[in-house]
Amino acid sequence: MPRVNRAAPIVLNLLLVAVPATAQTLPTLKVVSDSATVRVRPALLSETVKKVDAGTMLEAIDREDDWYWVILTPDEHGTRYPGWVRADDVEIVAAGDSRAVLRHFAEAVEQAKARLDAQAAEDAARLERARQKVEEARQAYEAVVKNGPAAAQSGAAPAQNAPVRIPAAKPHADVPHEREWFAGYSFYDDQTNGLSYGGGWLFSAARQMTPRIDLVGSISGSSRSDDLRGINLASSSIYTFAGGPKYTWPAQNRVTPFAQVLVGIASVHTTTLGVSDSSAGFALQPGFGVDLPIRKPVALRVGFDVETIHASGGWFTGFRINMGVMFVTGAAK
């Protein structure tokens, strides 16, 4: 999801230098099972990186007990990802050199960096064109404001064309001016990359505009970390700032259902082998939920939403489950 950091190839080149000339020769593997699961860590309950079919060739760079640490074949973007596969699912085909495997990995990262640099240059050009358009609109507005009084003095306006005072609209007497406040735990599952974010939180505030429609503002954060033998290999976090309308149905059996559509900005931060990177993009977040009253004005809220993020030139989708406490302040005028 985020862009590859410029320092990533430097880290991998340092790894190449650190491997001695007498390094252990590691094998090239072939998947012999109908399918094999490549995981983030050498454990059956670890998250899945990818599932590969029988006959797939994998390059190994290490082995731990009954697991091989391998490099997957390049994806559609030419990027190769590491992972762990069980020794029972593969067989040794030929000997290989771990230095060569890491070198291929570094070359793939360099290619990804070049693509992202080109995308960054295109984004910068697009931003400059937008800035020029804003400047042209500002100049046109100033010209209209400057010429307005002169046009008004060019002739006296007829009496019948005098401005008509329009009385200010009165607020709807039946609309209670209430505010909702919510804070709770959030679990996020990234469907595109197959990652789960167990550490999360969400805070939102809503202002009632009509008897059934509220205006909502929301801030949420989700994070995860992948460690191996006490060493942090990778970590990532997602922060979303969004707002939009929420519709609430009449309560049924003391349960109040609602649905909402929020739009905003998502910021993604990652750290891999000590190298950090970040990106930001558009976020669309439709969802629904229910409020279960505890004691007026406090209720238990359970919500579910689908978050779609456009960042680094691609779309990414995930599901979020929220649970926490909602309370209401304010009263009808």
Image: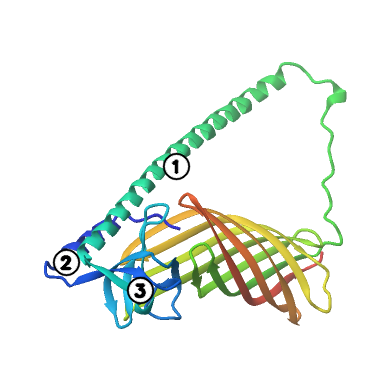
Which one is nearer the viewer's eye here, 296 or 229?
229
Q: Position of residue 153 (x, y in %)?
A: 71, 19
Question: In the depicted view, which residue is nearer to us: 290 or 191?
Answer: 191
Image depth: mark 2 or mark 1 in front: 2
Identify the residue at horizontal 64%, vertical 72% (top origin): 182
Can you identify the residue that label 3 sits on? 90
Residue 182 relative to residue 59: left or right: right
Query: Toward the viewer: 27 or 184?
Result: 27
Measured from the top left, where is residue 307 in percent x and y? 59, 61
Residue with the most extreme top position:
154
Alpha carbons under labels 3 and 2: distance apart: 28 Å
Q: Earlier in the sequence, mark 1 or mark 3?
A: 3
Q: Which quarter of the figure is the C terminus placed in?
A: bottom right
Left or right of 127? Residue 96 is left
Q: Amino acid at mark 2?
A: Ala
Pointer 2: residues within 10 angstroms few (<14), some, or many (20+)? Answer: few
Q: Dot 2: what SS?
A: helix
Q: Which residue is mark 1?
A: 123
Mark 3 and mark 2 lie on one chain; the one further toward the N terminus is: 2
Q: Which residue is mark 2?
A: 18
* Callout 2–callout 1 Cβ contact below 8 Å: no
Q: Are marks 1 and 3 in contact (CB under 8 Å)?
A: no
Which residue is situated farthest in the left direction here?
A: 21
